[in-house]
Image: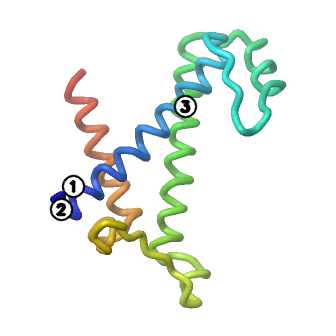
Amino acid sequence: MQTIKEIGAKFYLEILATIDIFVESMINDISQKTDNQSELDLTEKVKVLQQKNLSELELAALKMMVKGKMTGVIHSLLVTIDGGTALSDSGQALELINRKTNQPLSAGALHENFIKMLQVKNLMANASK
């Protein structure tokens, strides 16, 4: 049986991997390597960016900016779940529970654990370069 720490780590790594997938898909669409349709119809916005004919350097900068913003959104969502907002101050905080064990998904604050996992992932990526 997996520990809370192992389950939590998988949770955060899955979120980080999903961010990477969505950002890569966006960059591929803009650089005209793919033509993915999302739930939102962004076809016209993608065409505007495709017409810019962005360089690899510009695409890399855009990729990092969007990845940073998506990470920020996830962090803010986890802060909300952890109880760091006016909603939770009124007694409406949420807790993520593992269905199989009925235990919290992770020990400690989700938003703090998420940032720690992001830092570990970044350290590992930098070490492999």
Mark sitting on residue 6: 1
Nearer to us in this view, 118 or 44: 44
Drawn side of residue 43 relative to residue 117, left or right: right
Amino acid tagged 3: Val
Label 1 SS: helix
Q: Residue at x 48, y 78 (%)?
A: 83
Position of 37 relative to 82 (above/below): above
Quarter of the rendering occupied by the C terminus:
top left
**Circles 1 and 3: CB atoms closer than 8 Å:** no
Position of 83 relative to 36 (above/below): below
Report x, y in % for residue 117: 30, 50
Label 2 SS: loop
Task: Please name the residue that numbered disc 2 is placed on.
Answer: 3
Q: Label 2: how many residues lie within 10 Å, few (<14), some (14-19) or many (20+)? A: few
Quarter of the image holding residue 108? bottom left
Amino acid tagged 2: Thr
Q: Label 3: how many residues lie within 10 Å, few (<14), some (14-19) or many (20+)? A: some
Drawn side of residue 9 relative to residue 64, left or right: left
Return the residue found at the far bottom.
90
Report x, y in % for residue 51: 78, 12
Q: Label 1: how many residues lie within 10 Å, few (<14), some (14-19) or many (20+)? A: few
Q: Residue at x 38, y 70 (%)?
A: 97
Return the residue found at the far right.
44
Task: Please name the residue that numbered disc 3 is placed on.
Answer: 23
Q: Residue at x 55, y 45 (%)?
A: 70
Label 3 SS: helix
Report x, y in % for residue 86: 60, 81
**Circles 2 and 3: CB atoms closer than 8 Å:** no
- Of badges 2 and 3, nearer the viewer stands 2
- Of badges 1 and 3, nearer the viewer stands 1
Amino acid tagged 1: Glu
The CA distance from mark 2 to mark 3 is: 31 Å
